[in-house]
Amino acid sequence: MTNIIEKVSKKLYENNLSVVSAESCTGGWVAKQLTDLAGSSAIFDRGFVTYSNQAKQDMLGVSIEALDNYGAVSEQVVVEMVEGALKNSQADIALSISGVAGPEGGTEDKPVGMVCFGWKKRDGEAIAETIIFTGDRDEIRRQAVDFSLEGVISLVG
């Protein structure tokens, strides 16, 4: 178990908050990490693995316009993902991840390693950030999971 999981869990427990994840390129890895801890049902509501664009639309209400205009790997889409995750859960905080983990699929505008993140408290404004990680597919995904959880810690304060 990574130290980040212990830190985020402690923060959520201390503040009596729960989180929902909306994941694409990480394929449910955040949900898996959070549920590795016994008693995690107090801090983790549910996870959405929305790998395809259709899943993003069906499960989270991501608009076809955002997908067509910006692509799945965009700050616009991760913001719609966190909004949809909160709408379809009981959680207090949502996180979303969509990226190009590689080894293929990168473009000049969206290279392998580019990952977009979204976070939102139920009563707050959505935050989005884009990072370009280096490494192989597994390393990119692992870094994305940790970064998304660091964002939750920052959001809780």
Image (cartoon, rainbow, N blue to C red):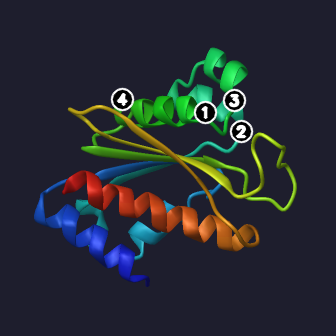
- Percent coordinates x, y for residue 131 in the rendering: 57, 54
Residue 51 image point, x, y percent? 68, 45
* Residue sitting at x 73%, y 51%: 100
Q: Amino acid at mark 4?
A: Lys
Q: Which mark is residue 54?
A: 3
Q: Indicate which disc residue 13 carries.
A: none
Amino acid type at image mark 3: Gln
Residue 36, given in percent of the width and then of the height, sits at 42, 76
Q: Residue 56, which numbered label?
A: 1
Q: Cβ–Cβ below 8 Å for labels 4 and 1?
A: no
Q: CA distance from mark 3 to mark 2?
A: 5 Å
Tag shown at residue 52: 2
Q: Is residue 87 above or below residue 48?
A: above
Work out whether residue 41 or residue 127 is closer to the camera in this orientation and state it.
127
**The N terminus sits in image quarter:** bottom left
In the image, what residue occupies the spot 40% across and 30% down? Answer: 83
Q: Residues within 10 Å of mark 1 (few under 14, many from 20)?
A: many
Viewport quadrant of the C terminus: bottom left
Sooner in the amino-acid sequence: mark 2 or mark 4: 2
Instruction: Decide which of tag 4 and tag 3 comes sooner along the chain.
Output: 3
Disc 4/disc 3 C-alpha distance (Å): 18 Å
